[in-house]
Amino acid sequence: MRKAAIALTAFLGGLLIVLCLGAGTASAQEGGEAVQGTLVSAGQPVANVKIDVKVEGGVAVGSAVSDDKGKWRVDVPSGGRYEISLDTATLPEGVGLINPDQQTLRVQVFSGNVRTVLFRIAPGGAASEKSESKWDRVPQLVFDGINFGLIIALAALGLSLIYGTTGLTNFAHGELVTLGALGAYYFNVTVGLNLIPAAILAVVVAGAFGYLQDRFFWGWLRRRGTGLIAMMIVSIGLALVLRHLYLYLFGGQSRQYSDYTIQAGLDFGPVNVTPATLFGMAIEIVIIVAVGIALLRTRLGKATRAVADNPSLAASSGIDVERVIRIVWTVGAAIAGVAGILLAMQQSVNYQMGFQILLLVFAGVILGGLGTAFGALVGSLIVGLMIQLSTLFIPEEMKNVGALLVLIIVLLIRPQGILGRAERVG
Amino acid sequence: MNWDTIFSVSVESAIGTSAVIYTLAAIGINVQFGYTGLLNFGQAAFMAVGAYGLAIGVATWGLNFWLSVGIGLAAAVALALILGVPTLRLRADYLAIVTIAAAEIFRITVRTSNYRDVTGGTDGLQQFSGAFFDINPYGRGQYGVGPVSFDERTMWVLTVGWILVALCCLLVYLLMRSPWGRVLKAIREDEDAVRSLGKNVFSYKMQSLILGGVIGALAGFIFALSTGSVLPDSYAPEVTFFAYTIVILGGAARVLGPVVGAVIFWLFIQFSDQLLRQAISAGYIPNSVMDTTQVGAVRFILVGLGLMLLIIFRPQGIFGDKREIALDAR
């Protein structure tokens, strides 16, 4: 009876979200081609900067002035090549282009698309990067790497535990991450709650969704005797459905929470952190430690490890395997939701944010050894550090490549992962 | 509601370039997944290296068109070797994750602005298909039956494309009747048994990966030629998932499965797309429920649902045999 009540409440909550998100979104991106961008200098938006757009080598199309969030947008008549220039005279005192050659950018706009253009500006302009040698960036990158690694670890914990207990390689795990971020956005921006209660509600919704998924879907597939590869392909289908349901309801643009998005950084020696990031890191560490202690010390944790080790043996020694799996799903999904909210606070809310980090989460899980919770933590930290530190040597846009390459290399040398047990694999 | 347009657009799509591209991609996957049991989730990367090999050869290096086709094919073989060496000894789910990761590595790398001089960055590459259309036997005009028609460029791409499909199907048919093909199927059923018979399983898997990858590169060529451009984001992971849906819809481990699957897939997708768009513009679906920008999302939702339902209720698809589908982990 109690179970049914929980399920019903969760289902209604989920339905509410779906309905309300639907009403609050869409219709923002109508019309045709445009160029747009956001001017940010050291984390702060830069307003009142004039941007001129003209057809490449031709006539002016229009101009725009950045608003108080640093955003600007110029509609262009059709697809084609355009020259976009930033009027440096309108930049605030002391702020300049990092690369003065990039005052005018030439871009291709495809018909029907909005093209985002990035002007890199910073306090001190060109001097800001040159004065800093490569190695001076290391402390900041290490810090950012640990922070990102901890976020990946939160998502990886659930993925790894679900794999360990059910054998499912869940390609739809990224969508749980997105659900957390979108839920918090809904409660924060659409409903108007402060971000902290909004985040708590979103985590509850994510956990409930995990519970319902297992209760009504994965559990049913397991009882039907669906094969593991089949379930993996099903999870790909589910991920496609969920991700594009988010797109349908939320729209394709990236958005920000209304609280704690613009904060001045605090300086700790060579490392600059916003209070929100510090707070987020504290949450990450508390959750990871709590899950670790629960796994090692509590009855439920021991039962979880027993199921991961050998489900049949666990069942025969009196452990309710289905119940353990359901709790793992609920907790794993809730933690993934937390990861989504923290990720969205650092980047922005986007319908495919979970899918974008899914491969990094897999990389973390595999690096540490599939199915081992502590391995997932170690692997994720390595992935996070790898991503940030690799920007010392490779272009920023390619930073995820480094982490994925490490994944392939580790599989070559140590297929069972860093903390995994060796077993015959084929 | 203009039913003529809905039907003609759907039929054009079912026999048009997208069907050809996805048929070829799916034939490649069928060799790897259907016959050998390899879960290659990086088929988009094989298409991309083919397309980029061709485009970089002609547009960046100024080489001959046919030489560039050779570069694309060689790149697909090289990718299969690079991917296969670390992963083919691994379990199926590892292979899936690594191949999808490799596909993303390739896509992120070619869209990076630092290599813009070679790959064109996010704008991709254009103007490499001149030599292909110079030998176009079709004169200017529309060709077709009734409301279904294509212009001369599309006709030429389609002619070459469907000939390639026919050749690939014939090749797969002949190979799978040969002793070589029987070894592949045996690997799918029980790798250890094959190994104990003294066959080099790794080598056979590698050959299967290369063959499927090269057929994927052919799909990449047709994709590039049909649009006249290569864009990095055309080779997102969804492309691979669509191709898997097609393989499973048509029936894995069946020579004509991918062809039937792709035709039905695109007929259905384009039909639902057009139906929704027309219903919206005619006002049957109010804008508060769905507008035209959301129709694109509905397409993916339908594909995802279709993939789930197929795998759960009919994993053998239309033509397949349930006993022949490698859906259990080992």
Image (cartoon, rainbow, N blue to C red):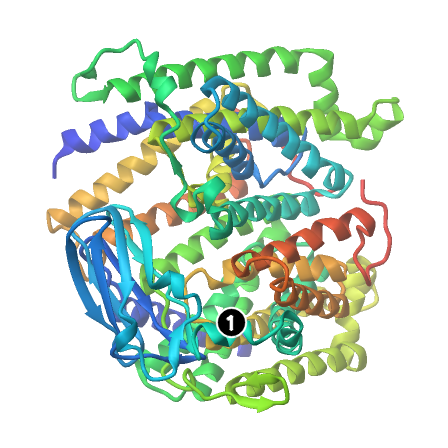
Say if B106 sits above or below B265 in the image: below
Which image quadrant for residue A270? bottom right
Residue B134 in sight from this viewpoint = yes
CA neighbours of label 1 inside 10 A, class few (<14), some (14 to 19), many (20+): many
| Residue A13: percent from left, percent from top | 40, 75
Residue at 26% in and 74% down: A66
Reading the image, the residue beneath label 1 is A340
Residue B30 in sight from this viewpoint = no
Q: Is residue A249 left or right of residue A241?
A: left
| Residue B212: percent from left, percent from top | 60, 27
Chain holding disc 1: A
| Residue A18: percent from left, percent from top | 35, 67
Say if A207 sits above or below A224 in the image: below
Which type of secondary structure does the marked residue at label 1 adopt? helix
Residue at 47% in and 13% down: B166
Residue at 47% in and 45% down: B236
The residue under label 1 is which amino acid type?
Answer: Gly
Which image quadrant for residue A41? bottom left
| Residue A332: percent from left, percent from top | 61, 70
